[in-house]
Image: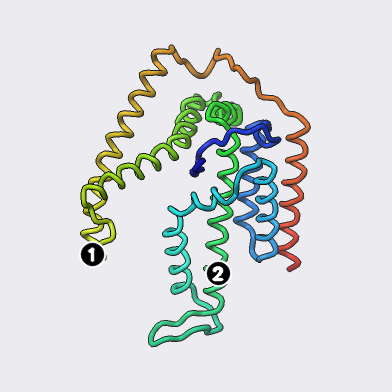
Amino acid sequence: MRIAIGQYVPGTSALHRADPRTKFVLTFAYMVVVMIADNYAAYLAAALYLGAAYVCARINVGKILRSLRPLIIMMVLTALLNLFFYRGTTVWIEIWKITIYKESALFALRMVLRIVLLVLGSSVLTYTTTSVMLTDGLESLFSPLKKIRFPVHEIAMMMSIALRFIPTFMDETDRIMKAQLARGSDFDSKNLISKIKSYIPILIPLFISAWRKAEELATAMNARCYRGGEGRTKFKVLKFTYIELILVIITAALLAAAVLANHVV
């Protein structure tokens, strides 16, 4: 099975059964840990925590890493920008007018590690939580905002639907590109303008497909008399168990280890 970013992977692991509200909070805590990490010891702690999460969820890491291919361009651009524009004190490489500092190379490496850890870490949430549970979890977490007439349910629904459409549109883009290649389109042109023009036949069908799928989803929800918010019953009632307590303790230990690593190492 090909795993894409944002796709739910069915399973019966402890992470799959955990309360979505807890997973939202812990995912946010993990992202904070990655953002405040200032050395490789803290990154190692975050990577070990992430590896344990994937092992617990019983998800094939190899397939997940292959799904990160669309992010390679972003990671390369991030590395190059930090490599050439971050100023340091120790010259590492100097070729003609190009100077690369040792500090800039290390900073670029940290930025790439941060992107990978953030993407893989946030993906654990979508890999182990259905769209319905995502919506219920978000709605429950933001329920205090209902007092100021904030459309909590609508926002939660839009976010969960957007997450679930990511793998659908990635597959759709792949199919359209293969169809265009069969018609003789050239996506490997070295000319930037020509390359941009070659992607127009992909964007237009993709936009039309997105519009059609959104209309079909709206029609299906209306046909089933869907009404969210107040008075809506739930098939699965959210509740905290010992699993959530264990996850909170482990995440708190990670946060403490990252803060300690920043100050000691």
Q: Position of residue 247 (x, y in %)?
A: 73, 40
What residue is shown with label 1? Answer: 191
Determine which quarter of the picture holds residue 165. top left
Q: Which residue is drawn at the image coordinates 44% and 69% (left, top)?
A: 80
Q: Where is residue 243 in the image (x, y as percent from the top left)?
A: 75, 34
Q: Element at badge 1?
A: loop
Mark 1 is surrounded, within 10 Å at the Cα level, by few (under 14), some (14 to 19) or many (20 or more) other residues, namely few
- Seen in the picture, residue 176 relative to 114 is either above or below; the reply is above
Q: Which residue is drawn at the image coordinates 38% and 39% (left, top)?
A: 169
Q: Earlier in the sequence, mark 2 or mark 1?
A: 2
The amino acid beneath tag 2 is Phe
What residue is shown with label 2? Answer: 107
Determine which quarter of the picture holds residue 175. top left
Q: Which of 156 and 220 is in front in this view?
A: 220
- Seen in the picture, residue 216 relative to 180 is either above or below; the reply is above
- Seen in the picture, residue 157 relative to 55 is either above or below; the reply is above
The amino acid beneath tag 1 is Asn
Q: Horizontal placement of 235 versus 86: left or right?
A: right
Q: Where is residue 65 in the image (x, y as percent from the top left)?
A: 54, 52
